[in-house]
């Protein structure tokens, strides 16, 4: 499907069966404010409620099982305590007039026994080429254990259960995270997937795990409640796909007829030929997360407009929402944005650099 007519960023729109006031989406942002056991905190409820002006909030990555945990204080969605904690968050956002999806993320080799208590798993026993943040500081990555086929099937089932848990916790739907170097992306990439069975080798095998996860999650809660996030050619977490131009058309085609809520493409540029190809292949809503890190209202509006003109239906912003709880109003009025005061505050506990960013009204 080709869509070339420009859209109004601030006009009402539909997404995932929801009537939204505009086309701005809050992208998922890991913030490390959950409890040590993965239970979302009351501070997280405050943070998300402050940002309920987003058309849709995609809450930060939550793990579908224990071994999928990446870093310390990452939320989970595989225990009763997690469901109850997230329910407090969704209740707060709903009371503030917002809508929420939850991102489901398995870290794969991006993890550490000091965080999860378990040896990480991956498509192949190839370690992350970076250190991993743990409660005692940055530690060398360990060699992950290769998943067996039975364990792959069990992991697919864990994603489906996590999706049902998310709905029980009050989310309108979930986003399957097949991006940014985590487990599903590790199966897609040649340098992290050296398998010789039905989950490795040619493209149709390397996309199989993501397709099976998406199908299982869609069957569990309904495809209209499921989004898929991808990040073509993103080298983060040591990823080198090798054949990006083959992977993503095949993957998108494989899930295009499921009737999913949206496809979310990360770090995309309006002039990228792959974006236009995927837009042609994708029959539903497309959420685009812009490449780069625009720091002022004008630049954000300009970039969003170019992506909408290139066929995106909605624009997902991350760091701009982090520092501006009233981001939509600031963009609508071309007001200055709060700068991110200190990058390390993104990933430490407490309210500083989290819930204490001022709104325009507070500074007037």
Image: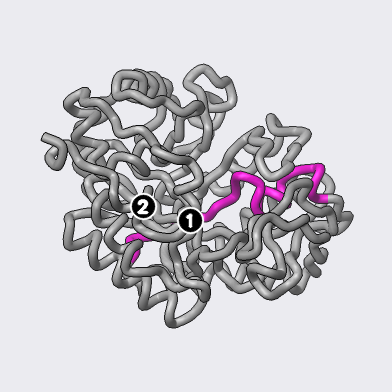
Task: Give the image quarter of residue 332.
Answer: top left
Coordinates of residue 295 in the picture (x, y in percent): 38, 26
Q: Residues within 10 Å of mark 2 (few under 14, many from 20)?
A: few
Q: Residue 348 carries which label?
A: 1
Q: Determine the residue positioned at 52% across, 63% down.
A: 74
Which of the two residues, 243 or 355, is positioned nearer the viewer here?
Answer: 355
Figure quadrant of the N terminus: top left
Q: Is residue 271 left or right of residue 52?
A: right
Q: Residue 352 carries which label?
A: 2
Q: Do the residues labelled 2 and 1 touch (CB within 8 Å)?
A: yes
Q: Residue 259 carries which label?
A: none
Which of the two residues, 231 or 16, is positioned nearer the viewer here?
Answer: 231
* Mark 1, secondary structure of its residue: loop
Q: Residue furthest bottom?
A: 80
As drawn, 326 above or below 82: above
Which of the two residues, 339 or 259, is positioned nearer the viewer here?
Answer: 339
Residue 175, can we see it? no
Q: Determine the residue positioned at 34% across, 40% down.
A: 323
Q: What stretch is highlighted in magenta?
A: 171-193
Q: Determine the residue positioned at 88% across, 55% down.
A: 196
As drawn, 208 above or below 241: below
As drawn, 246 above or below 159: above
Figure quadrant of the C terminus: top left
Q: Determine the residue positioned at 50% across, 63% down.
A: 62
Coordinates of residue 181 in the picture (x, y in percent): 66, 47
Is 359 a magenta residue?
no
Coordinates of residue 230 in the picture (x, y in percent): 56, 42
Residue 115, can we see it? yes
Q: Residue furthest right?
A: 196
């Amino acid at each position: 499907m080709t869509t070339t007519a420009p859209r109004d960023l601030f006009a009402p729109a539909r997404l995932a069966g929801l009537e939204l006031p505009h086309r701005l989406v809050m992208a998922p942002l890991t913030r490390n404010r959950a409890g040590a056991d993965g239970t979302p905190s009351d501070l997280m409820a405050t943070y998300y409620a402050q940002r309920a002006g987003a058309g849709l909030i995609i809450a930060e990555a939550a793990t579908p099982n224990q071994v999928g945990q990446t870093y310390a204080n990452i939320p989970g969605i595989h225990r009763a305590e997690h469901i109850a904690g997230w329910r407090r968050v969704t209740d707060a956002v709903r009371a503030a007039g917002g809508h929420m999806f939850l991102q489901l993320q398995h870290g794969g080799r991006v993890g550490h026994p000091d965080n999860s208590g378990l040896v990480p798993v991956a498509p192949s026993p190839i370690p992350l080429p970076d250190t991993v943040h743990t409660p005692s500081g940055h530690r060398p990555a360990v060699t992950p254990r290769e998943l067996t086929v039975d364990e792959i099937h069990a992991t697919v089932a864990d994603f489906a259960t996590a999706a049902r848990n998310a709905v029980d916790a009050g989310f309108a739907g979930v986003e399957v995270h097949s991006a940014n170097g985590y487990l599903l992306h590790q199966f897609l990439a040649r340098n992290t997937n050296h398998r010789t069975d039905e989950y490795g080798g040619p493209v149709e095998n390397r996309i199989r795990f993501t397709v099976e996860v998406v199908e299982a999650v869609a069957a569990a809660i309904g495809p209209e409640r499921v989004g898929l996030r991808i990040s073509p050619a993103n080298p983060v977490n040591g990823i080198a796909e090798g054949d990006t131009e083959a992977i993503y058309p095949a993957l998108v085609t494989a899930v295009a007829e499921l009737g999913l809520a949206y496809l979310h493409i990360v770090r995309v540029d309006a002039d990228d030929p792959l974006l236009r190809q995927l837009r042609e292949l994708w029959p539903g809503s497309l959420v685009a997360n812009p490449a780069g890190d625009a720091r002022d209202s004008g630049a954000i509006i300009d970039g969003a407009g170019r992506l909408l003109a290139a066929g995106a239906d909605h624009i997902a912003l991350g760091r701009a929402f982090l520092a501006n709880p009233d981001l939509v109003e600031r963009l609508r009025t071309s007001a200055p944005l709060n700068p991110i005061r200190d990058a390390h505050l993104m990933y430490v506990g407490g309210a500083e650099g989290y819930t204490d960013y001022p709104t325009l009204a507070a500074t007037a």
